[in-house]
């Protein structure tokens, strides 16, 4: 009996131990299907492809717009022109176009319509002045040789010559009229009012830096200071011209550039764009500007404004419209009317109306279900 009782106790103990050993596996086996089922939920798996599918057309539209807006001279493979999504990257030193050159005797190459017109007139006037100056110099030398004392011991008593007097009166008049016509045309082009849809940029002169605000794009302001010499050299940009923040503008579009000052008189001047306008405290000056090619264009304050007048350079960066819009977004600005066509790709136009009429998501889905059978009837 004792042996039987001992055997029974041993078997019951072994059974209890076996149940305790198997209970964690049973619990994990029961919990595993719930975990797998949750991970394999069709809605959770289907969500990423759906959002990716919705985002694809928007990305394609942005890429097509960027490809269409980039100028022929802009290399699409360059790292400074972002493909597809139109992300903004500052132009590198290889895009520098408007800057002074060592030993240069002529004007800087012009990249604006007004600048090209002014350069043509300048080149004509230089040759005209050279011809007139050489002609007058030739007359002086001839008179000095022809009427010298040794050859003319008795001086001439000639008082006048009608033909010569008429000639030297009419020729200068014709020359001046010929100069005045293109000059007036150039002045008119320089001060012509910008179109109504032109982008407005306000440049404010401070001692001794510039501020660029964009009233049409949220009113934010970008402060531009000259870079230290070593930092400009590291970036591959010219010293005393490179800045930390450039004035970014769209290429090939008219800009309404307004200038003012916060302290003393400054002057906003960019030679390669044939652009110069004073910035006067308490006054708002305005001129139009168009840059024809993407690139970086340097200028300087051209009005003595204090101790550090020489250390407030101007740097303008002209980029295609998609890059400009990307820059606006990076600064927290708004794109404006150009962003309106892209709105339907982000959210349906009827969504705000349905949400305003229906307070709950379930009730907003009901009209959609009711509208489904109405389509065949139409």
Image: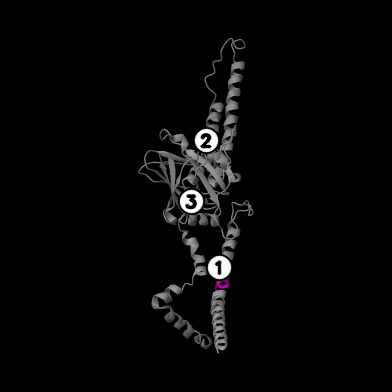
Which x, y percent locates residue 187? 48, 43
Mark 2, residue position:
176
- Where disc 3 sits, the SS reads strand
Q: Look at 56% across and 35% down and name the residue there.
A: 125
Kindly identify the residue that appears in the image at 51 percent across and 65 percent down. Answer: 342
Classified by dominant secondary structure, the portion drawn in magenta counts as helix
Q: Is residue 47 magenta?
A: yes
Disc 2 from disc 1: Cα separation: 64 Å
Name the residue at the bottom extreme: 1
Is residue 142 positioned above or below 72 on the image?
A: above
| Residue at the disc numbered 1 | 55
Closest to the observer, 318 or 49:
49
- Mark 3 to mark 1: distance in Å? 33 Å
Residue under label 3: 255
- Using the image as rendered, state which of residue 124 and residue 223 is in the foreground: 223
263 on left or right of 195: left
Residue at the image point whose x is 54% and y is 15% from the top: 157
The mark lying in front, picked from 3 and 2, is 3
């Amino acid at each position: 009996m004792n042996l039987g009782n001992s055997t029974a106790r041993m078997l019951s103990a072994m059974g209890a131990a076996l149940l305790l050993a198997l209970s964690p596996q049973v619990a994990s086996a029961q919990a595993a299907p719930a975990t797998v089922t949750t991970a394999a939920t069709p809605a959770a798996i289907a969500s990423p492809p759906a959002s990716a599918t919705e985002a694809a057309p928007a990305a394609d539209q942005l890429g097509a717009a960027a490809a269409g807006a980039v100028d022929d001279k802009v290399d699409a493979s360059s790292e400074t022109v972002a493909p597809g999504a139109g992300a903004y990257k500052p132009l590198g030193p290889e895009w520098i176009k408007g800057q002074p050159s060592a030993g240069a005797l002529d004007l800087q190459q012009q990249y604006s319509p007004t600048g090209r017109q002014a350069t043509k007139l300048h080149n004509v006037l230089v040759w005209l002045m050279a011809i007139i100056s050489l002609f007058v110099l030739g007359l002086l030398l001839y008179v000095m040789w022809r009427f010298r004392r040794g050859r003319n011991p008795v001086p001439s008593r000639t008082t006048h010559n009608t033909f010569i007097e008429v000639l030297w009166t009419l020729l200068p008049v014709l020359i001046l009229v010929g100069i005045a016509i293109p000059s007036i045309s150039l002045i008119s082009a320089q001060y012509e009012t910008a179109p109504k849809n032109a982008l407005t940029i306000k440049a404010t002169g401070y001692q001794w830096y510039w501020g660029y605000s964009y009233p049409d794009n949220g009113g934010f302001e970008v402060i531009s200071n000259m870079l230290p010499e070593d930092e400009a050299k590291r970036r591959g940009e010219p010293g005393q011209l490179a800045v930390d923040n450039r004035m970014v503008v769209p290429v090939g579009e008219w800009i309404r550039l307004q200038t003012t000052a916060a302290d003393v008189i400054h002057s906003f001047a960019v030679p390669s764009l044939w652009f110069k306008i004073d910035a006067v405290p308490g006054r708002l000056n305005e001129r139009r500007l168009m840059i024809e090619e993407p690139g970086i264009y340097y200028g300087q304050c051209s009005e003595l404004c204090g101790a550090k007048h020489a250390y407030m350079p101007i740097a303008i960066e002209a980029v295609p419209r998609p890059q400009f819009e990307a820059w606006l977004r990076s600064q927290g600005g708004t794109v404006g009317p150009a962003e309106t066509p892209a709105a339907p790709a982000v959210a349906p136009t009827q969504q705000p109306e349905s949400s305003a009429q229906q307070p709950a998501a379930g009730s907003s889905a009901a009209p959609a279900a009711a509208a489904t059978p109405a389509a065949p009837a139409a």
